[in-house]
Structures are given as structure tokens and as C-alpha cells.
Amino acid sequence: MELITQTEFAKMVGVSQPYIAKLIRKGVFIDCIKDKKLIKECALKAYYNSKKRKSIEDYSRLSPLQKVQVKKDEWAAKLNELHYRVQTGEFKDKEEIDKRAENVLVAFRNKMLALPTKAAPVLVGMNDEEKIKAIIINYIDEALSELERLKELSD
């Protein structure tokens, strides 16, 4: 997190320091001030977001080098935000999620494949269709409950 003065920021974006002070009073940089300085990435994003709302022409007046710097800083801010979310646990690793899902699905598949073997001895010789349906539904509910339990364990 790089802190810069209002004057440095004004030079960076090609405006005067009093104009930056005016934007601060308007609340454009409300979340971008620390120790009376601007947080560079946040301020750039806030500045260009406020400008985008005002007009796209302001951005087009920047030199190509300034545009590259703005894009670089915007992407750096996005990357920092992503790293923060990963560190706080808001985002999980894709491979970890895939492995957990695979474990749950394999366990469920095994339960469902075992169903005929488990139900056959109980159902053999039964003629009452309603009782057969009730027993099969009971076994399916049992497999689904197991799936729910596995899902809770993987969280």
C-alpha cells in the first residue's frame, strides 16, 4: 500500500492540487485517506470512477503513459484485493474444492451402487408394491442423508 501526497497524486493524474483537495471535500476519496495521505491504488480507482461518471473524455485526455499507469494501478489494486480475499478465507483454492466435491460424489455413488445389494435380501419374496416402494425410499433417504453428512464434513 503506497501512500502519496495530494500534490504527487495531482501530478500523476494531471490536475492541480486544489482540485484534488476539492474532490476530497466532496467525498470522492472517502475510503482512500490514511495519515492525511492518499492510498495510491484506491485513490486512482476512486478518481477515475468519479471521472467515468462525469465523462469518458477526461480519461481520453490522458497521455498514453498515464493511461498505462492507471491500468497498471487498477490491476494492482484488483490483485491486492484478490490476495486479501484469499488470505481471509473468502475464496478457496479450486483444487481443494474439486477434491472435496469428488470425495462426496464418490461416496454417494458407492452408496447408490450398494443399494441393490443391500435391498435385495429384504425385498426378495415381497409382493406388496407399497411396502417395496417404502423400503426403497427409506434406503434412498438413508443414502441422501449420508451425502448431506459428507457435505457437512467437507465444509
Image: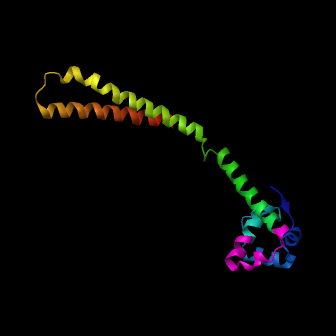
Q: Per the image, is 59 magenta? A: yes
Q: Position of residue 58 (x, y in %)?
A: 76, 78
Residue at position x 61%, y 41% in the image: 93
Quick one: which residue is furthest to the left in this view? 127
Write down the region rendered in magenta: 48-66
In the shown orientation, is residue 17 left or right of residue 29?
right
Image: 96 above or below 120: below
| Quadrant where the N terminus is found in the figure | bottom right
Which quarter of the picture shows residue 109?
top left
Viewer can see residue 29:
no
**Residue 144: where, in percent of width, then height?**
35, 35
| Residue 65: image location, x then y, percent | 85, 67
Q: Is residue 34 left or right of residue 99?
A: right
Can residue 51 be seen here? The reply is yes
Seen in the image, is 19 located left or right of residue 100?
A: right
Q: Residue at x 87, y 66 (%)?
A: 5
Pinpoint residue 51: horizontal percent, then vertical percent.
72, 76
Looking at the rendered structure, the number of numbered marks drawn on it comes to 0
The quadrant holding residue 3 is: bottom right
Please name whichever residue, 10 or 100, is drawn nearer the observer in this view of the structure: 100
Is residue 150 shown left or right of residue 8? Answer: left
Between 49 and 121, the one nearer to me in the picture? 121
Taken as a whole, is the magenta stretch helix, strand or loop? helix
Q: Is residue 134 magenta?
A: no
Closer to the camera in the image, 41 or 108: 108
Extreme residue toward the top, this view: 121
Scheme of image coloration: rainbow
